[in-house]
Image (cartoon, rainbow, N blue to C red):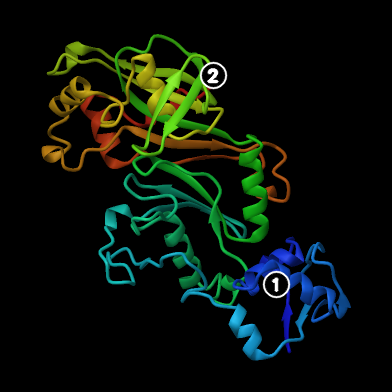
């Protein structure tokens, strides 16, 4: 027999969901059978599994240690997330694989329930088959190494991110440290109550503020999307507002190309939405090798050769720079009517300086 007292991070979820994490190798049919036979009880009473857990609730498993061990198999560190060294000087993963110091995210905001990162370009938001470092892995290691979570906590609760950015897009990514934070923050994004703003440097002279709508279809095999003006089989609706902040005419650049610094407000969040939509409209994002085209990429390399050495560390100029929260943030009162911004990465600032434009002027133009 084992007893489990529900902690704050475990409260707010259904009992059957909690049991599924605790006994993560047990079939659901087995869990419901144990509940029916009262081999699993809640506060010493029979339970159905649909009950919502509260702090200090008592879950008792009337099972042998051997049975519990058979159905409870967790990775080192409490789960499948890869663990990374959080030390900014070592630059190594705990697994021994190299972790680039430049790819370590900075923390913009943190409280008891949520944590906001400024994700660098090149870092995955979530892990994939490549096994490359991800923000979720960094988040897990940060919370474990800081003592906010323990390995025992990780058997029944996994912190996670609540919005995502493409690998090569930098900017604000939010995460839930507690179950309350993860649930409520994810719901705010799902209900599109959080306003999301991006900055990008695009090719051409973007004439005026405009809201672009269309339909996006992704080809997963090549990780690329196409934009259509009318719905097609397999497409998803997209909508974005674009506002030009500053135009940089061709006369100031060696290639003869012109650029515009644009603020984009995302109303729908689809894969590669801003990148593909701007390229489809004739204003591809500078440095975007997937959508900009050979001519635009050639101009970009010529104009900013001094910043990107031999093109080896070339970056696309797209950054998720601001989030605005509504008055009603559910239980996350500290976020109500707050705005959070992420500073531009160094290469983005350097390019703007080449164009005689300072980052501070962006914030002077807020409406």
The residue lying at 66 percent from left, 69 percent from top is: 27
The residue lying at 24 percent from left, 35 percent from top is: 350
Q: Which residue is mark 1?
A: 7
Query: Is residue 343 visible from the viewing direction of this image?
Result: no
Residue 114 drawn above or below residue 34: above
Residue 296 shown left or right of residue 338 in the figure = left
Q: First in sequence, mark 2 or 1: give its number.
A: 1
In the image, residue 20 lies at what x, y percent?
Answer: 66, 68
Residue 179 shown left or right of residue 52 in the figure = left
In the image, residue 155 lies at what x, y percent?
Answer: 59, 73
Residue 44 shown left or right of residue 257 in the figure = right
Residue 282 shown left or right of residue 9 in the figure = left
In front of the other: 357 or 342:
342
The residue lying at 36 percent from left, 39 percent from top is: 221
| Quadrant containing the N terminus in the rendered view | bottom right
Residue 179 drawn above or below residue 307: below
Secondary structure under the numbered disc 2 in the rendered image? loop
Crowd band around label 1 with a 10 angstrom C-alpha radius: few (<14), some (14–19), many (20+): some
The residue lying at 43 percent from left, 61 percent from top is: 137
Crowd band around label 2 with a 10 angstrom C-alpha radius: few (<14), some (14–19), many (20+): some
In the image, residue 15 lies at what x, y percent?
Answer: 76, 67
Give the number of the mark in front: 2 or 1: 2
In front of the other: 34 or 359:
34
| Disc assigned to residue 231 | 2
Query: Is residue 164 visible from the viewing direction of this image?
Result: yes
In the image, residue 285 lies at what x, y percent?
Answer: 32, 26
Residues at marks 2 and 1, CA–CA distance in whole angstroms:
47 Å
Residue 153 drawn above or below residue 258: below
In front of the other: 132 or 326:
132
Q: Are marks 2 and 1 in contact (CB under 8 Å)?
A: no
The image quarter in which residue 353 lies = top left
């Amino acid at each position: 027999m084992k007893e489990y007292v529900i902690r704050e991070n475990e409260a707010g979820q259904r009992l059957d969901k909690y049991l599924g994490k605790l006994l993560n190798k047990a079939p659901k049919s087995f869990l419901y059978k144990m509940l029916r036979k009262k081999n699993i009880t809640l506060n010493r009473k029979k339970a159905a599994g649909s009950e919502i857990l509260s702090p200090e609730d008592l879950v008792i498993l009337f099972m042998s240690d051997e049975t519990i061990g058979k159905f409870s198999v967790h990775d080192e560190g409490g789960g499948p997330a890869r663990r990374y060294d959080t030390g900014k000087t070592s630059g190594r993963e705990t697994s021994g694989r190299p972790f680039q110091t430049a790819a370590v995210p900075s923390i913009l905001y943190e409280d008891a329930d949520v944590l906001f990162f400024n994700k660098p370009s090149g870092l995955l938001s979530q892990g994939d088959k490549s096994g490359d470092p991800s923000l979720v892995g960094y988040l897990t290691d940060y919370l474990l190494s800081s003592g906010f979570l323990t390995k025992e906590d990780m058997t029944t609760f996994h912190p996670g991110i609540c919005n995502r950015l493409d690998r090569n897009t930098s900017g604000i990514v939010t995460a839930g440290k507690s179950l309350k934070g993860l649930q409520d923050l994810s719901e705010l994004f799902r209900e599109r109550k959080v306003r999301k703003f991006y900055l990008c440097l695009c090719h051409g002279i973007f004439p005026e503020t405009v809201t672009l709508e269309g339909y996006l279809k992704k080809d997963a095999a090549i990780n690329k999307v196409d934009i259509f003006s009318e719905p097609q089989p397999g497409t998803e609706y997209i909508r974005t507002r674009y506002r030009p902040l500053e135009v940089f005419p061709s006369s100031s650049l060696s290639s003869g190309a012109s650029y515009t610094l644009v603020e984009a407000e995302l109303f729908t969040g689809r894969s590669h939405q801003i990148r593909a939509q701007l390229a489809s409209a004739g204003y591809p994002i500078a440095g975007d090798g997937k959508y900009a085209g050979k001519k635009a990429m050639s101009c970009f390399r010529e104009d900013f050769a001094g910043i990107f050495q031999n093109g080896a560390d070339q970056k696309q100029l797209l950054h998720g720079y601001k989030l605005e929260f509504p008055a009603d943030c559910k239980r996350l009162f500290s976020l109500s009517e707050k705005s959070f911004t992420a500073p531009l990465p160094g290469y983005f600032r350097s390019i703007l300086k080449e164009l005689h434009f300072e980052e501070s002027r962006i914030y002077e133009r807020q409406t």
